[in-house]
Amino acid sequence: MIDLHCHTTASDGVTLPEELPRLAESMGLSAVAITDHDTVEGVEAFLSSPCISLVPGLELSSVCEKDKCHIVGLFIDHRSEELLETLQQLQVWRRERNQMMAHRLTEIGIPVDIEEVEALAEGVAGRPHFAEVLVARGVCGNLNEAFKKYLGDGAAAYVPKKSLEAADAIRAIHRAGGLAVWAHPMARSNMTNARFSRMLDALFHAGIDGVEAYYPDHTATKKLTVLREVEMRGLLASGGSDYHGGGRHTGIMPGTFANGGPLGIPDDVLYKMEDRLGRGG
Ligand code: AMP
Ligand code: FE
Ligand code: FE
Ligand code: ZN
């Protein structure tokens, strides 16, 4: 069993990049990928703890047909100059957005200083770190409440993030030698099969390599739908837990559903990717 979607302290996870491999191993996994939001800062440390198979990656926030979509890059060269330049731009956009969110919060009577939020984040600062500040201050009882009232899409202090077009995210991943995977396509409650299929056609056109079928929020039916659509187009199936740890995505561990049960992502998923990259052994 494997897990190709995990976060660390390089973005909004709680596990250190160098500790993720051992944690995944202790969960009985034979491979794990590091996929932090808009950064490869954790990759070097992650790769320095060899035990099980380690896949360097990242997760790019992007937009496809005016809808948000996350693109996971796997097997990327984390030293690629071009990729690092793209990530630099994303950091600039994030910082601008964080400043606007701090401003919004201050306007509605919760003075938040961006330095305070950034100090809390070891890597890329985002909404989860704002949520932590609100909880630490006693403004909200928990992270969920912070998202519901202030930070979630459409909430009082929400500011949309400028992000890449999916085609550009896919291109950036390809130029860094990686495979591009559409992350958690069916996790949104309002995602219909028809919409999924239409977005997948657009992403296919843009060169997507695979789609996450195995994901904690995907019902068995959704997983089968994704597997069918992926197979029809000759794409790769992928998946992972989206492990963050702590109060985020409660209960989920590398390789598991929120209830602790195994996601059951077969090793074959990884072998097929290695074949596609011409690294099959
Ligand atoms: P950002 O990339 O700054 O927009 O932050 C998005 C991240 O916030 C996601 O990757 C999740 O880790 C986290 N998140 C989103 N919704 C919630 C929620 N309701 N409770 C806790 N964390 C959340
Ligand atoms: Fe996250
Ligand atoms: Fe995501
Ligand atoms: Zn993720």
Image: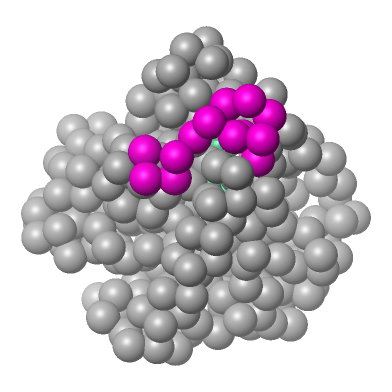
User: Can you see residue 165?
Assistant: yes
**The quarter of the displayed image where residue 33 is located:** bottom left
Residue bounds of the magenta highlight:
104-116
In front: 59, or 128? 128
Residue depicted at x 74% and y 33%: 155
46 left or right of 8 in image: left
Location of the C terminus (image quadrant): bottom left
Relative vertical location of residue 139 with respect to residue 249 in this rendering, above or below:
above
38 left or right of 1 in image: right
**The quarter of the displayed image where residue 220 is located:** top right
Residue depicted at x 20% and y 37%: 23
Location of the N terminus (image quadrant): top left
Where is residue 215 drawn, in percent x and y? 55, 41
Relative vertical location of residue 78 with respect to residue 29 in this rendering, above or below:
below
Residue 161 painted magenta: no
Residue depicted at x 45% and y 40%: 113
In front: 120, or 234? 120
Count of marks, rendered view: 0
Which coloring applies here? one colour
Residue 110 painted magenta: yes
In front: 229, or 198? 198
The residue furthest right is 194
Where is residue 17 drawn, in percent x and y? 22, 50
Where is residue 258 drawn, in percent x and y? 49, 24
84 left or right of 30 in image: right
Where is residue 261 drawn, in percent x and y? 44, 23
Relative vertical location of residue 48 with respect to residue 224 in this rendering, above or below:
below
